[in-house]
């Protein structure tokens, strides 16, 4: 990525966004339930002076309706 020169920056234009109520007038509703599950298991049974390690997994599911 090359840096902009002052001439390029001066040539850029911007415009104002419409008011929020104008943007909301279409009443489009998006529903996206997201479910995340984290599971980890470690077993350290009937042992003396030992350590237990756990492997963790994460599952994420999303469904978008519109």
Image (cartoon, rainbow, N blue to C red):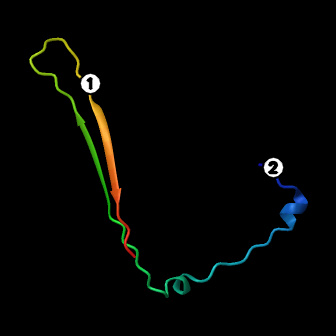
Pointer 2 with pointer 1, Cβ within 8 A: no
Q: Does residue 8 sit above or below 45 in this rendering?
A: below
Mark drawn on residue 24:
none
For the point 75% across and 73% down, the residue is 14
Left or right of residue 8, residue 52 in this image: left
Q: In the figure, residue 55 lies in which quadrant?
A: top left
- Is residue 42 rendered to the left or right of residue 18? left
- Could you say which is closer to the camera, residue 13 or residue 29? 29
Q: Earlier in the sequence, mark 2 or mark 1?
A: 2
The vertical placement of 55 against 64, above or below, is above
Disc 1 crowd, CA 10 A, few/some/many (<14, 14-19, 20+): few
Residue 48, position as x, y percentages in the image: 13, 12
54 horizontally vs 46: left or right = right
Residue 16 vs 49, above or below: the answer is below
Residue at 16 percent across and 22 percent down: it is: 44
Callout 1: SS: loop
- In the foreground, 25 or 33: 33
Q: Residue furthest right?
A: 7
Mark drawn on residue 2: 2
Count numbered badges in the picture. 2
Task: Say which residue label 1 marks.
Answer: 53
Label 2 neighbour load within 10 Å: few <14, some 14-19, many 20+: few
Label 2: element kind: loop
Decide if residue 53 is on the left or right side of residue 64: left
Q: Residue at x 40, y 76 (%)?
A: 66
In the image, farthest residue toward the top: 49
Label 2 vs label 1: CA separation?
Answer: 48 Å
Residue 56, quarter of the rendered image:
top left
* Residue 2 percent across, percent down from the top left: 81, 49
Look at the picture and state if 44 lies above or below 62.
above
Task: Name the residue rendered at 58%, 83% in the picture.
Answer: 19
Q: Position of residue 42 (x, y in %)?
A: 21, 29
């Amino acid at each position: 990525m090359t840096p902009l020169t002052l001439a390029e920056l001066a040539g850029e234009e911007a415009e104002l966004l419409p008011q929020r109520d104008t943007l909301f007038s279409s009443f489009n509703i998006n529903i996206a339930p997201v479910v995340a599950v984290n599971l980890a298991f470690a077993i350290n049974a009937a042992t003396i002076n030992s350590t237990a390690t756990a492997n963790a997994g994460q599952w994420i599911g999303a469904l978008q309706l519109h």
